[in-house]
Image: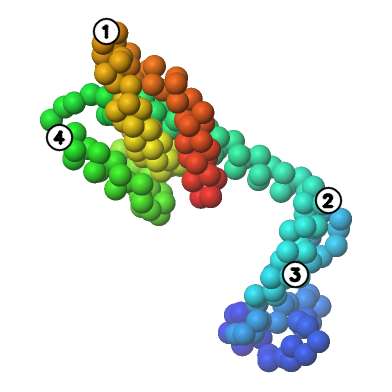
Amino acid sequence: RRPGSYPAASFAGGPKRLRSKRGSSHPTVSYATSCISWRCGAGETSTVMGGGTIDAAQTALALLWNFDARLGRVVALSLYVSGMACAIASLFGMALGAWIAVVRFPGRRVVIALLNTLLALPSVVVGLVVYLLLSRAGPLGALGILFTPTAMIVAQTILVLPVVAALTRQLVADAWHGNGEQLRSMGARPLVAAALLLLHERMALLMIALAAFGRAISE
């Protein structure tokens, strides 16, 4: 018998297990049904059939109720990575967006169009670019951070940065349109005016940071 091939068996009454010659058990696999089993925090084994939404929900609730240690570590790592990426992207993205909003320079319209286009940047593309940069054959392979939380933070920062910059630029541009004349009459330079507008719109910036965090944590 070829490796991985098993005799046909009926699935009536749920998945069954077959005994090999050595007495070890093997799961019976069907084209129509796939069965995944793992151990919950309470020590019970939960079985999730393919497409079994109710079973999956029950297993998820059991893991949350029993506060499985492995689940806690996974959640903590996800929050840490997304939080760090959001903080770094907010620091640079808000400064960049405010600068683009108040400073006039050649090619500004092209930069704004590119920034708005990057709002739809696919996460797969970002992951592939980061992988090629950080792999052993890549230009940053010597850092040795591939498949580490640091690499995930880098990827999510690249993914979130255009969101923060584009939304901040629009926010500061609207505020500059209403208050720019007053700030110029007081002698405020563009960068100082941008900083003042960021301070004035701090609650809206908080909403931008939350939107960026939602974009990061969803990946």
Q: Is residue 127 left or right of residue 24?
A: left
Pointers 1 and 2 in contact (CB under 8 A)? Answer: no
- Check disc 3: other Cα within 10 Å, few if <14, some if 14-19, many if 20+: some
- How far is mark 1 from mark 2, CA to CA? 61 Å
Q: Looking at the image, which residue is at 74% across and 58% down?
A: 60
- Check disc 1: other Cα within 10 Å, few if <14, some if 14-19, many if 20+: few
Identify the residue under disc 3.
55
Asked if 85 appears above or below 137 in the picture, the reply is above
Of callouts 3 and 1, which one flags the residue occurring earlier in the amino acid sequence? 3
- Disc 3 vs disc 1: which is toward the camera? 1
Q: Position of residue 155 (x, y in %)?
A: 43, 42
The local secondary structure at tag 4 comes to loop
Pointers 3 and 1 in contact (CB under 8 A)? Answer: no
- How far is mark 3 from mark 2, CA to CA? 16 Å
Pointers 4 and 1 in contact (CB under 8 A)? Answer: no
Q: Looking at the image, which residue is at 53% across and 44% down?
A: 214
Residues 52 and 181: in front is: 181
Q: Amino acid at mark 1?
A: Gly
Q: Amino acid at mark 3?
A: Asp
The local secondary structure at tag 2 comes to helix
Q: Position of residue 1 (x, y in %)?
A: 61, 87
Q: Is residue 7 visible?
A: yes
